Image: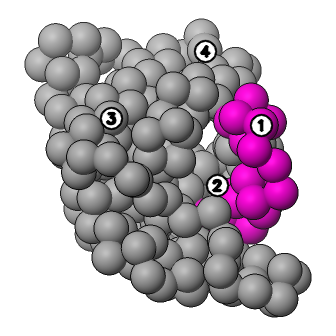
Amino acid sequence: MKKYIAEFTGTLMLTLIACGIAITTLNHLVIALAFGLVVIACAYSIGNVSGAHVNPAVSLGFALTGQMKWSEFGKYVCAQTLGAIAGSGILSIITESTESLGANTYSGSVWIALLVEVILTFIFVLTILGVTDKKENTHVTGIVIGLTLTLVHLFGIHYTGTSVNPARSIGPALFQGADALSQVWVFILAPIIGAALAACFFKYILKNNTSYLNIQK
């Protein structure tokens, strides 16, 4: 139960703080750093309990590479999604509005949005699988993951606002409605595809059998 509470809390933090910062500035670097820094905070606070996935795409990557039981995967996703919804709900109370909660949307081609999100999720999840597979990286894992999330945000904000995280997109969309809700399927489907591709690439091309991050233990 502690794992699921940790994932709920971490995803709540990500949605509340990072999306909360995103709606107060147009500076892409500040927004990217907000998401990256929250993930770093999660990694070093709840990481020893749940692995600090705070993202269904990340959990899918671990499940597909055999580092997570599928029964746990479903519970992780539920906890993460509920955490994101709770974070968005709190943000709507603080801002006294549901018009802008940092939801992901796109204004151009849906195919470009899908492509961007698939590629960025692939990079993000592959980095996580790689860095957590090496025992000597233990002390820098959270920093590497946080900086990688910052990196993919810097590229993707212009096109989609950068999701790479279905839970983070679902939470704000449920409250904002309109385009955010009608387009949220893109930010669910694309990260799933990106994570699956990353897991396959890692498992069959890059896999290091010394993996230490196995939450079945």
Asked if the residue under mark 3 is in contact with the one under mark 4, i.e. CB atoms within 8 Å, the reply is no
Secondary-structure class at tag 2: helix
Q: Are marks 2 and 4 in contact (CB under 8 Å)?
A: no
Q: Residues within 10 Å of mark 1 (few under 14, many from 20)?
A: few
The residue drawn where x is 38% and y is 25% is 123
Dot placed on the residue nearer the N-terminal end, 2 or 1:
1
User: How far is disc 1 from disc 4 in space, using C-alphas?
Assistant: 31 Å
Q: Is residue 180 above or below residue 140?
A: below
56 above or below 34? below
Residue at coordinates 75% horizontally, 86% vertically from top-left?
97
51 sits left or right of 177 in the view: right
Tell me which amino acid carries mark 3.
Val
Instruction: Name the element at disc 3.
Output: helix
Nearer the observer, disc 1 or disc 4?
1
* Mark 4: few/some/many CA within 10 Å (<14, 14-19, 20+): few
Q: Is residue 12 visible?
A: no
Question: Which disc number belongs to residue 27?
Answer: 1
- Amino acid type, mark 4: Asn
Compared with 1, 148 (above or below) is: above
Distance of label 2 from label 3 (alpha carbons)? 32 Å
In the rendered image, which residue does mark 3 sit on? 116
Q: Is residue 111 magenta?
A: no
Q: Residue lying farthest front?
A: 108
Mark 2 or mark 3, earlier in chain? 2
SS at circle 1: loop
Give, as a three-letter code, the residue at label 2.
Answer: Val
Q: Is residue 83 left or right of residue 107?
A: right
Q: Position of residue 95 (x, y in %)?
A: 84, 80
> Can residue 147 be seen by looking at this rendering?
yes
* Residue bounds of the magenta highlight: 7-33
Q: Residue at x 39, y 53 (%)?
A: 107
User: Which disc is residue 49 wearing?
Assistant: 2
